[in-house]
Image: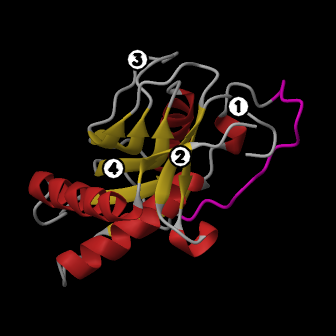
Amino acid sequence: MEEPKVIMEKQRFGLTIDRLCHQLVESHPSFSNTCIIGIQERGAIFSDRIRERIGILYPGLDFLYGKIDISFYRDDFRIRTKPLKVASTEIHFLVEEMNVILIDDVLYTGRTVHSAMAALMDFGRPASIQYMALVDRRFNRHLPVQADFKGITVDAVDEAYVKVEWKHLNGEDRILLYSAKTDHI
C-alpha cells in the first residue's frame, strides 16, 4: 500500500486548533446561551481538544459542553454490514433556544452532521446550529451541508481517505491523506 501524504503536520495542526478557538470566541464572546457538542467518536476527540484550548486561551470562559452519539440516527443504520459501534451521549442539559456548535473531525458527505442534528432534537429545539469541522473534504457531498468553522479544505476524490491522528492516541497530531480507502484504517 502506498504511504499516506501528510497534509497537516503538528505545528500547523496546533495553530489551526488555536485559530478555530479564536474564531469561536469571536463569534460567541461570552458563550451565553451557547454550547459545544462533539459528535462521537472522532468529533468528540476534536471537541475535547477545542474545549481544552479555549480553557487555556480564555481562562474563566465557561460554556456548556456535551457529546452526542448518532449511531441510531444514521440513514444506513438498518443496512450496515459491519457491526455498529455505539458510543455514549453525554448531554446533561437541554438545548432549547440555545446556540449549538456541533463539532466533527472530517466533513465528507454531510450525512454525519445530518444525523447529529436529528439526534440533537431529542434535547430540545436549538435557536441555531453551527458546524465546525477540522477537515472539509469539499467534494462528494451528498447533502447540502457546509462548515461554519473549518480548519483545512481538502480536495480529494471519493476513493481517497482522510485520517486525523491525535497525539494522545497516535503519538502525533497530524492529518493524513490516503490515496484509496483501506480496511485497516
**Image quarter of residue 71:** top right
Q: Nearer the viewer, residue 120 or 25?
A: 25
Mark 1 lies on residue: 181
Q: Using the image, determine if residue 172 lies above or below residue 19.
A: below
Task: Give amino acid for label 4.
Answer: Ile
- Residue at 80% from the left image edge and 45% from the top image edge: 184
Q: Residue 169: where, in percent of width, then height?
A: 62, 70
Mark 3 lies on residue: 144
Q: Using the image, determine if residue 160 lies above or below residue 13.
A: above
Magenta segment's dominant SS is loop
- Tag 3 or tag 2, which sits nearer the N-term? 3
Mark 2 lies on residue: 176
- Tag 1 or tag 4, which sits nearer the N-term? 4
Is disc 1 surrounded by few (<14), some (14 to 19) or many (20+) residues within 10 Å?
few
Tag 3 secondary structure? loop
Question: How far separated are the C-alphas under marks 4 and 3?
Answer: 18 Å
Magenta stretch in the rendered image: 78-90
- Tag 1 or tag 3, which sits nearer the N-term? 3
Query: Disc 2 vs disc 3: which is toward the camera?
Result: 2
- Residue at 19% from the left image edge and 83% from the top image edge: 59
In the image, residue 86 lies in the stretch drawn in magenta: yes
In the image, residue 25 lies in the stretch drawn in magenta: no
Task: Give amino acid for label 1.
Answer: Lys
- Tag 2 or tag 1, which sits nearer the N-term? 2
CB contact under 8 Å: marks 4 and 1: no
Mark 4 lies on residue: 101
Question: Residue lying furthest front in this view?
Answer: 2
Is disc 3 surrounded by few (<14), some (14 to 19) or many (20+) residues within 10 Å?
few
Question: How far separated are the C-alphas under marks 2 and 4?
Answer: 25 Å
Q: Nearer the viewer, residue 179 or 139?
A: 179
Tag 4 secondary structure? strand
